[in-house]
Amino acid sequence: MLYERKNDTVGNLALELAVSSHTIRNDIRVLELEYPIYTKVRAGGGVFILDSSRLQQRWLTVRQRELLMSVCDMLDDKKLRKTNSEEKKAQQERKKVLDIQENHTINRTILIALYKVQIIG
């Protein structure tokens, strides 16, 4: 994201990534060792990327990112449908078990009643 913008503030990055400014500063210190980024303090300061830098096309274009996100959304939808389908099957199995238990209770009640009739009758 920083490569697309060329610069940003620590606060904006922290807000966008849902982390603290302290985390962003620590990460920048590590990234500065391998990537052409630097920070500038005071007015107009922030995190910057050297104008001449490139990462050998390691980033996605906006269109590629959109396609990737739509594929992820489709996979999430399929996973949700599968989860819902599995939950429905589990509910059906639980219902079968309850039906069997109910039938067992009814049959037991009938057997007890028949037994009592034989004893009394």
Image (cartoon, grey):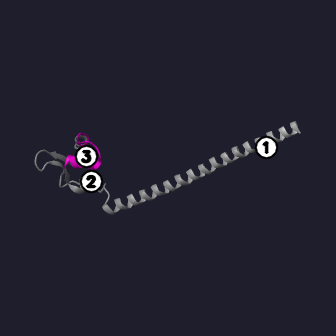
Q: Is residue 106 magenta?
A: no
Mark whose residue sits in front, 1 or 2: 1
Q: Secondary structure at mark 1?
A: helix
Q: Which stretch did the figure color magenta? A: 9-24
Residue 87 in the image: above or below residue 30: below
Front position among marks 2 and 3:
3
- Whichever of labels 1 and 2 marks the residue nearer the N terminus, that label is 2
The reply, left or right, for residue 94 in relation to residue 45 is right
Residue 21, compared with residue 4, is above or below; it is: above
Q: Amino acid at mark 1?
A: Ile
Which residue is drawn at the image coordinates 49% and 57% (left, top)?
78
Identify which residue, 55 or 16, lies in the foreground: 16
Say which of 2 and 75 sits in front.
75
Q: What is the x, y in percent for residue 87?
A: 56, 50
At numbered mark 3, what does the secondary structure look like: helix, strand or loop? helix
Q: Is 115 left, or right, of 37 in this rendering?
A: right
Identify the mark at residue 1; answer none if there is no mark.
2
- Please give left or right for residue 91 compared with residue 100 in the image: left
**Other-residue count near label 2 (Cα within 10 Å), few / some / many at <14 / 14–19 / ≥20:** few
Q: Which mark is residue 110?
A: 1
Residue in the image at 68% along x and 48% along y = 99
For label 3, the residue is 14
Residue 60 position in % (x across, y down): 32, 58
Q: CA distance from mark 1 to mark 2?
A: 73 Å
Q: Amino acid at mark 3?
A: Ala
The residues bearing labels 3 and 1 have C-alpha atoms spaced at a distance of 70 Å
Assess disc 3: are there few (<14), some (14-19) or many (≥20) residues with their C-alpha within 10 Å of its C-alpha: some
The kind of secondary structure element at disc 2 is loop
Residue 23, compared with residue 9, is above or below; it is above
Please state which of the two labelled residues, at mark 3 or mark 1, is closer to the viewer.
1
Left or right of 87? Residue 53 is left
